[in-house]
Image (cartoon, coloured by chain):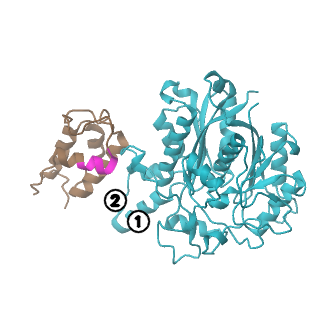
Amino acid sequence: MSTQQFTLDDLKRILIEGAGAEETVDLDGDILDADFEHLGYESLALLETGGRIEREYGITLDDDVLSEANTPRALIDAVNGQLQGGSQAAA
Amino acid sequence: MSAVVVTGLGVTAPNGLGVQDYWEATLAGKSGIGRITRFDPSQYPARLAGEIPGFAAEEHLPSRLLPQTDRMTRLALVAADWALEDAGIRPQDLPDSSMGVVTASSSGGFEFGQGELQALWSRGSQYVSAYQSFAWFYAVNSGQISIRHGMKGPSSVVVSDQAGGLDAVAQARRQIRKGTAVVVSGAVDASICPWGWVAQLAAQRLTTRDEPAQAYLPFDAAADGYVPGEGGALLVLESEESARSRDARVYGEVAGYAATFDPAPGSGRPPGLRRAIELALADARMDADDIDVVFCDAAADPELDRIESEAITAVFGPYGVPVTAPKTMTGRLYSGAAPLDLATALLSLRDGVIPPTVHVTPAPEHTLDLVADRPRETGPRSALVLARGHGGFNSAAIVRASA
């Protein structure tokens, strides 16, 4: 079982690599419960972000995880759920 | 019918970034053609191109746009920004639905697509960017300009190779006549990457020469193909009323336009270029005598050059009108070529000077009054711009100084 943790810093790095950052948004601020949409990331940016998380961490995220996780906290929780022995953990 | 006028220009060209750089270089006869630097061209039969030097997208565009844009789109976004600024238009001050975007495209975002294809075959499908869904797409420049400036009025893309640059402006003119206040139009193409290059080689119309000053020679006895380039121009078009109501500086009017299609090979019917010129004149309600300069298509293919010089001579008479091809300094920019010629023509009207064609000595059978080597200060008031697309497209547009 993986003991790896997916943190807010990991998410921020992957968001910036995959989709850049909105100039008017401070990703270093208190964003854990901010809506992705308010942070400037539309569904396609989240699809790209999800793809990058999947290949970097060797996990598979259900499509509805990406559409339902509206905030960084929700997405981080979903990723960590997979990393810590989620039923779909990568072989 | 209300006149449609141009109030803003944005230029990204191999011999100049921005209108002023480009115009100064063009009048000085400075060429942007050289050996390809963006990849090693030594294994390919053609090795020269008009590349835009010194364009750093991150200096002009937000980081949010960089992972999702091909080079051509980055250039187009910057050209659109410059054109709007030049026109003095702040899109956020206008109703969304009163502004549209109509661009042309010849190939789409090849460099982006090449990167994603490489990721697909070398690493697997999960490494293909979600943005490949649109970043390569013909309509992407229209889409990204529209999103960036909140322009939600009639928008589209025209795909007819090099003729498309004029066809897009014509479509913009139609939308303005139907009531859209402002349309950003024109085109920027850029596909100088290995994948884009082999696609261009496939048509077998590129020169294989290596000396930049002796390579792209339209109407010359030595013409043996063209040099491709990257870049183009975007123009802000609006109705004359709209321009006057905000006291905008007007470069000129898009006074006439027509497009024709060549007959099938072997049909025995004549090529369509002459008829495109005549129909554009009729559309503008002008005679051949009213045209002060022709910006020609300049294919640098002996047969296509012959067709073009015969069409010009048929309408204007031998040596009947000054003809120029400043694209000899940029290479052929595909859909970006004709909008750049339109922008150049409008600058000619503004400053009363015809820019030169460089490096060309016209062969005697071309009875053209070619403006060669140096600019000619004839005070032009109107210009005809010609563009032909691979496969039989012919388009002609006329711009004239506003009264």
| Image position of A67 (left or right of B220) | left
| Image position of A20 (left or right of B357) | left
In this rendered view, identify the residue nearer to me: B367 or B181: B367
Q: Are marks 2 and 1 on the same chain?
A: yes
Residue B382 drawn at (x, y percent): 77, 42
Q: Quadrant of residue B142?
A: top right
- Residue at left 65%, top 37%? B172
Residue B293, numbered circle: none
| Image position of B223 (left or right of A85) | right
Q: Chain of mark 2?
A: B
Residue B156 drawn at (x, y percent): 59, 41
Chain letter corresponding to the colour brown: A
In the rendered structure, the colour chosen for chain B is cyan
- Whether residue B105 is visible here, answered yes or no, is no
In this rendered view, identify the residue nearer to me: B140 or B62: B62
Q: Quadrant of residue B62?
A: top left
Mark 1: give few (<14), some (14-19) or many (20+) Cα within 10 Å.
Answer: few
Three-letter code, disc 1: Gln
Q: Is B3 in the magenta? A: no
Residue B370 drawn at (x, y percent): 79, 59
Q: Secondary structure at mark 1?
A: helix
Q: Please name the residue that numbered disc 2 is placed on.
A: B127
- Whether residue B160 is visible here, answered yes or no, is yes
Region in magenta: A13-20
| Image position of B289 (left or right of B229) | right
The quarter of the picture where the C terminus of chain B appears is top right
Three-letter code, disc 2: Tyr
Q: Chain of mark 1?
A: B
Residue B253 drawn at (x, y percent): 72, 35
Disc 2 from disc 1: Cα separation: 10 Å
